[in-house]
Amino acid sequence: MLTFHDGPYLVTGASGGIGAATVRRLRSAGCTVYASGRDTDKIRALCDETGAFPLPFDLRDEASIEGAVSGIDWYGVVNCGGDGGEIAAPQDTDIEVFDRVIAVNARGTLLVTKYAAREMIAAGRGGAIVNVSSQASLVALTGHVSYGASKGAVDTITRVSALELGPHGIRVNAVNPTVVMTPMSAWYWDKPETGGKLLEAMPLGRYATEDEIAAPIAFLLSNEASMISAVTLPIDGGFTAV
């Protein structure tokens, strides 16, 4: 059984499937959790269900992030908020969409880390940050130039943050999931011509569930992972090894 510091923990993207599953898992372990996400109705319902606290802010707005995150002595952070962008080849990419995906996925992850880490350092208790990246940062996926670039940046943010924050006892890791059939993914991957090819190439031959991503996130936040930092962990059924 995993053990945790009592928190508090921040989970962004909690109105999505992986974020919500992470909130539920942390709350079931007795952790104090703050949930943030773009769908305020879903966040409110999740907090009513689990006893988490809502903490709304805009991942594209530095002032919004600073105002929400500052002043709380965080022990853990899960950067799960994301934008799936579009499916396009480099020559067809909509640069406005590219900029938005980078702003949410990469810049948003860095900004939450920036302001949360300041509070974690000030509290002097160490802590853990887990960034939700993607298999799209590890291998080339057709049409994923914007999303893959943003998640490649998340992996670099993870490694550099682990280097910089390690002396303060703060561990920083990332998980790199394969497809989970959340609404953000289903519109593209739930088709024979796309998802079928991915499943054929995956040794385990199936998509991941939300809980199968939330469980490793929780492990990386836990006391049992106290010597793990700077890892980018594929949770992909073996896809990136093929």
Image (tube, rainbow, N blue to C red):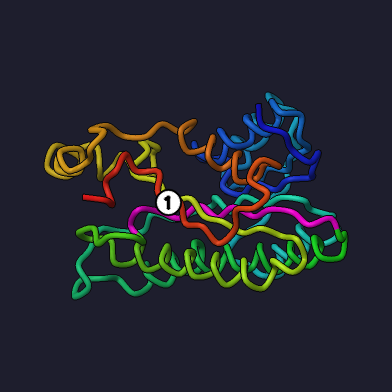
Give the left or right position of residue 214, taking residue 189 as reference: right
Q: Is residue 126 magenta?
A: yes
Magenta segment, which residues? 125-136
Q: How many marks?
A: 1
Q: Determine whether, in the image, residue 225 is placed left or right of residue 85.
A: right
Is 37 or 198 nearer to us in this picture? 198
On screen, 28 above or below 196? above
Question: Is residue 89 inside the magenta stretch?
Answer: no
Q: Residue at x 35, y 45 (%)?
A: 178
Q: Amino acid at mark 1?
A: Asn
Quarter residue 162 falls in: bottom right
Viewer-closest of 128 and 152: 128
**Percent x, y of residue 133:** 45, 55
- Which residue is painted at 51% across and 57% down in the image? 231
Q: Residue at x 23, y 33 (%)?
A: 205
Image coords of residue 51 (percent x, y): 75, 29
Q: Quadrant of the N terminus?
A: top right
Asked which quadrant contains residue 191, the reply is top left
- Tell me residue 143's x, y (percent): 22, 60
- Judging by the rendered image, the residue that carries numbered circle 1 is 176
Query: Residue 20, position in %: x, y?
Result: 57, 35
In the current view of this chain or complex, which residue is farthest to the front? 227
> Tag 1's secondary structure?
strand
Q: Residue at x 28, y 52 (%)?
A: 240
For label 1, the crowd category at 10 Å Cα-Cα, with few meaning under 14, some 14 to 19 and many 20 or more, is many
